[in-house]
Amino acid sequence: GKFLPLKTMLGPRYDEQVAEENRFHPSMLSNYLKSLKVKMGLLVDLTNTTRFYDRNDIEKEGIKYIKLQCKGHGECPTPENTETFIRVCEHFSDKNPSELIGVHCTHGFNRTGFLICAFLVEKMDWSIEAAVATFAQARPPGIYKGDYLKELFRRYGDEDDAPAPPELPEWCFDEDEEEDDDNGKTGGPESEPGSSSSSFGKRRKERLKLGAIFLEGITVKCVTQVTTQPKLGGIQQKCQQFCGWEGTGFPGAQPVSMDKQNIKFLEQKPYKVSWKADGTRYMMLIDGKNEVYMIDRDNSIFHVSNLEFPFRKDLRSHLTNTLLDGEMIIDKVNGQVVPRYLIYDIIKFNGQPVGDCDFNVRLACIEKEIIFPRHEKMKSGLIDKAQEPFSVRNKPFFDIYTSRKLLEGNFAREVSHEVDGLIFQPTG
């Protein structure tokens, strides 16, 4: 064969976020090629970002690297993209007929398959039916976006003859999923298709941010991104169900900025106040021993090991079916950076819908059922705090008249991290 389609590689910088068995470094590609005793002379990168890996790691192996940015995000490769791809590959192949051409987008199915099929039709006189079928056989399930298949047949045959898209891969649960790997500043490498099946049995679109960063500026031990199915979709779905969320994406409540219109709400019902930390929003799912997961606002899931949440009535047992809301912050203590998770709300406790209770009851539940049992187990030496990836605290809320104090410099110094404003929470 002339082409080797593959998924994108991720450089070693993402090892903290990707489980070892799921890693795909540029060096692994080189070793794979050597094991097959074949030579790849050209790699065409179709992604719309430069952050997945260092092209120098490819070029130092003697492989020519070409960046051909195809937007994805619901758009087929343009005629200009296609013309450039064909011209580059034909020129290389004419000069190096025995060397492979590697091609990848994010997953190596849709954009990759589209352009390889276009080459086979335009330069090797294949029918579009044969090209699509051969690509699917070589890299199952092949092109799985219906609009890509229709566009190929529109260009090289009859759109009405386009086959139905194949059954979706297990990590993709929506035929309309889009790949989006543009260079937006999203805190980590770009969005990709992921999945979660809905509580109503329908297929829904979720997005997996490949190589998501757990906490900017600091490496947190024992935290790895969950990227495999059905584990990923199961966690996403459980969190959505616990929140009563029937849509896709992050199910947590969204804050509303205070303005001259809604400030009047503070007079209409009781509120508590806390400080707004310069942190990162995370929900936490506690679902048994070594089954603790953090969910960020992109709906990325991180597994956290070495973090225990014992059951208050039996410290030997571990909490399950518990969903918390809070934020990761970085404290500076004696010149050292200390990651902490501040819990400010609870949705489910051991399957019980405490999120339906008023806010004062929820705060009491966090203190009594989440924080207190951990401290008790620490006192008995059964939890080694030094081995945990980050500390866990409840975030206090105060009577509303303390608002001014929370903004003063003395309080900001006491909490060891930046105070970024105030949060008002109704208690009724």
Image: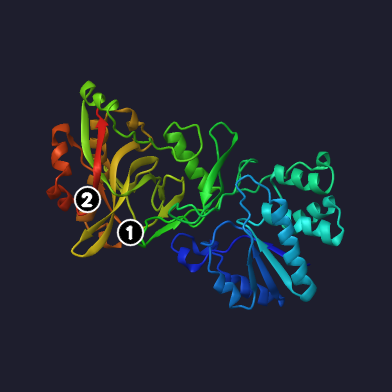
Q: From the viewer's perspective, is residue 372 above or below residue 51?
A: above
Point 24% across, 36% down: residue: 363
Q: Quadrant for the C terminus, please.
A: top left
Residue 389's disc is: 1
Q: Measured from the top left, where is residue 312 in percent x and y?
A: 26, 43
Between 84 and 183, the one nearer to me in the picture? 84
Number of labelled discs? 2
Point 82% across, 49% down: residue: 156
Point 51% across, 62% down: residue: 51
What amino acid is labelled 1 in the image? Pro
Residue 332's disc is: none
Mark 1 / mark 2, whichever is N-terminal: 2
What amino acid is labelled 2 in the image? His
Viewer-side label of 1, 2? 1
Structural crowding at the residue carrying mark 2, measured as other residues with C-alpha within 10 Å and reported as few (<14), some (14–19) or many (≥20)? some
Question: Is 53 on the left-hand or right-hand side of 222?
Answer: right
Structural crowding at the residue carrying mark 1, measured as other residues with C-alpha within 10 Å and reported as few (<14), some (14–19) or many (≥20)? some
Residue 375's disc is: 2
